[in-house]
Image (cartoon, helix red, strand yellow):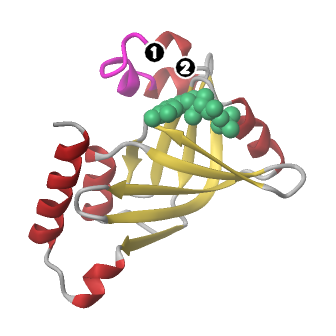
Amino acid sequence: MPLNDFAKQLIKNFPLGFVATVTEEGLPSLSPKGTFFVLDDDTIAFAEIRSPNTMENLKHQPKVEVNFIDIWLRKGIRIFGGTEVCERGTDEFKQIINLWETPFPALAPRINAIVKINAERVKLISTPPYDDGISEEDMIATYKQKFAEIYP
Ligand SMILES: Cc1cc2nc3c(=O)[nH]c(=O)nc-3n(C[C@H](O)[C@H](O)[C@H](O)COP(=O)(O)O)c2cc1C
């Protein structure tokens, strides 16, 4: 299912995705990855730097769900799909690593692999106040104020 413009822009603006995997015991495991990029209409990817449990989980169940949220707009996306791990040293890793090298020069040497996710299902999600008719402008204004109180 191709990523639409909203999904692509959201990941560009908020590249912090929460990645859900499943442990060997069948338990949920969720951890954040702040290095997401859209590779093409059907593929997103993050850099594996320090995610041993996620990588272990992908060996027995190579599927993930990832959530991205615009915390001001209170809208987001859920992406579900299969994964493919491009290990450092492979031709494919060499072809795509430049995407991460420019924005993350200090982290780039510590990237062990790029984890690609094929977006099989993409779902838009929004906070319930939108059901009552709140506008996007009001939502953004509300959360700008809330965050300004936390970090004036
Ligand atoms: C905001 C944030 C962004 C992060 N981004 C990444 C990332 O892009 N790649 C990565 O490997 N680890 C990243 N981490 C670190 C992992 O989430 C962290 O080491 C975690 O404990 C790994 O758990 P796991 O092995 O269950 O995935 C990030 C952590 C935070 C708090």
Q: Residue at left 16%, top 53%?
A: 144
Q: Is residue 18 left or right of residue 4?
A: right
Classed neighbour count for the residue bearing mark 2: other residues with Cα under 10 Å, few (<14), some (14–19), many (≥20):
some
Q: Are marks 2 and 1 in contact (CB under 8 Å)?
A: yes
Q: Which residue is mark 2?
A: 111
SS at badge 1: loop
SS at badge 2: loop
Q: Taking 22 as reference, is 100 above or below it?
A: above
Question: Looking at the rendering, in which quadrant would you find the C terminus?
Answer: top left
Q: Residue at left 84%, top 48%?
A: 60
Q: Which residue is mark 1?
A: 107
Q: Residue furthest front?
A: 149
Q: Is residue 64 left or right of residue 108?
A: right
Observer able to see residue 114: no
Q: Is residue 87 left or right of residue 126?
A: right
Disc 2 to disc 1, C-alpha distance? 7 Å
Observer able to see residue 126: yes
Residue 31, horizontal then vertical, whole percent:
59, 43
Looking at the image, in which quadrant does ligand 1 appear? top right
Q: Magenta span covers which residues?
A: 97-106
Q: Confirm or reject: label 1 Cβ below 8 Å from ligand 1.
A: no
State yes or no: residue 57 in magenta: no
As shown in the figure, which amino acid type bears the numbered disc 1? Answer: Leu
As shown in the figure, which amino acid type bears the numbered disc 2? Answer: Ile
Q: Taking 75 as reference, is 15 above or below it?
A: above
- What type of secondary structure mainly makes up the magenta span? loop
- Nearest the viewer among 95 and 131 is 131
Q: Is residue 51 left or right of residue 146?
A: right
